[in-house]
Amino acid sequence: MSGEKGILYGVGVGPGDPELLTVKAVRLLEAADVIAAPDSGGESRTALNIVRDYITSKPVLLCPTPMTRNRETLDRAWEDNAAQICALLEQGKQVVFVTLGDPTVYSTYFYLHRRVLAQGYRAEIVPGVPSFCAAAAKLGVPLCEGSQRLLVVPASHGDLTDSLDVDANKVLMKAGRQLEPLKETLRQQGELENASLVVNCGLPGEQVWSSFAQAEGETGYFSTVLLRQETQTEHRKAGEAK
């Protein structure tokens, strides 16, 4: 061994469809010595499943990612994750950490990225397709046009009223646990008819609703609401086309 330290790559794997992986992501996955993946304690391990076909027989390091906002619990978990990855980098291993969507958009990857850099190791970011871009593509609509602004908001974090008042098209991410309260809020604000919903974009159980008002049935954590200005006519035409 030459003694050269390895590099950590934070690779965005997109929202769910393996065909949305970038060429660079595939190259790094195939060249990696170790694949690291977030593990929230369930069995889904969505990011890991997306890349399964590219990592056959490679060792996988599962990194606990507690679903909590308790800062002490999160810090302890990510300190442990960083320590394990730094040990691999010290051995000269190339490590790819897979993360849903894009690593720079509400991603847990940065908990790891900062710690690895602070320990003196190299860490690089590889962008992926954000879920809201894939959702807009499924709906066949633009996120923004001309001089329109775009506001991206985590729907699971508190009161959205101030965000809804902003003159912009809006992306409400990770809305699954708040869908019914969110629907009622949009109704009260007179915005419900301008909203669309995509659930599990590119994953099993995908649902695409051009009208959030008509959405029904079970939804999951990976739910994205697009709130676009002047879309009532589009919803009406979509309804006529069904």
Image: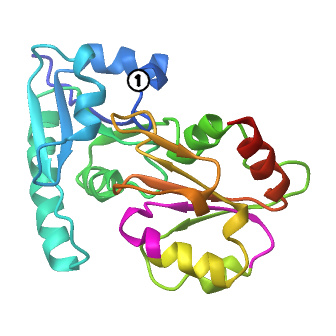
**Camera-side residue of 143 and 90:** 143
> Which quadrant holds residue 242?
top right
Question: What's drawn in magenta, residue-wise?
Answer: 166-180
Residue that appears at 80% across and 44% down: 237
Magenta-drawn stretch contains 93: no
Which quarter of the image is occupied by the N terminus? top left
Residue that appears at 73% across and 78% down: 190
Q: Which residue is mark 1?
A: 25
> Which quadrant holds residue 68?
bottom left
Q: Is residue 39 above or below residue 140?
A: below
Would residue 6 be visible to someone looking at this image? yes
* Left or right placement of residue 37 versus residue 173 in this view: left
Would residue 142 be visible to someone looking at this image? no
Decide: few, some or many residues near mark 1? Use Cα within 10 Å; few <14, some 14-19, many ≥20: many
* Left or right placement of residue 190 versus residue 163 in this view: right
**Camera-side residue of 20 and 195:** 195
* Left or right placement of residue 28 versus residue 242 in this view: left
Residue that appears at 34% across and 57% down: 221
Instruction: Please tell me whether mark 1 sits on a helix, a strand or a loop.
Output: helix
Image location (x, y in percent) of residue 229: 81, 62
Q: Is residue 173 above or below residue 210?
A: below
Image location (x, y in percent) of residue 115: 26, 57
Q: Amino acid at mark 1?
A: Ala
Image location (x, y in percent) of residue 234: 80, 48
Image location (x, y in percent) of residue 194: 73, 62
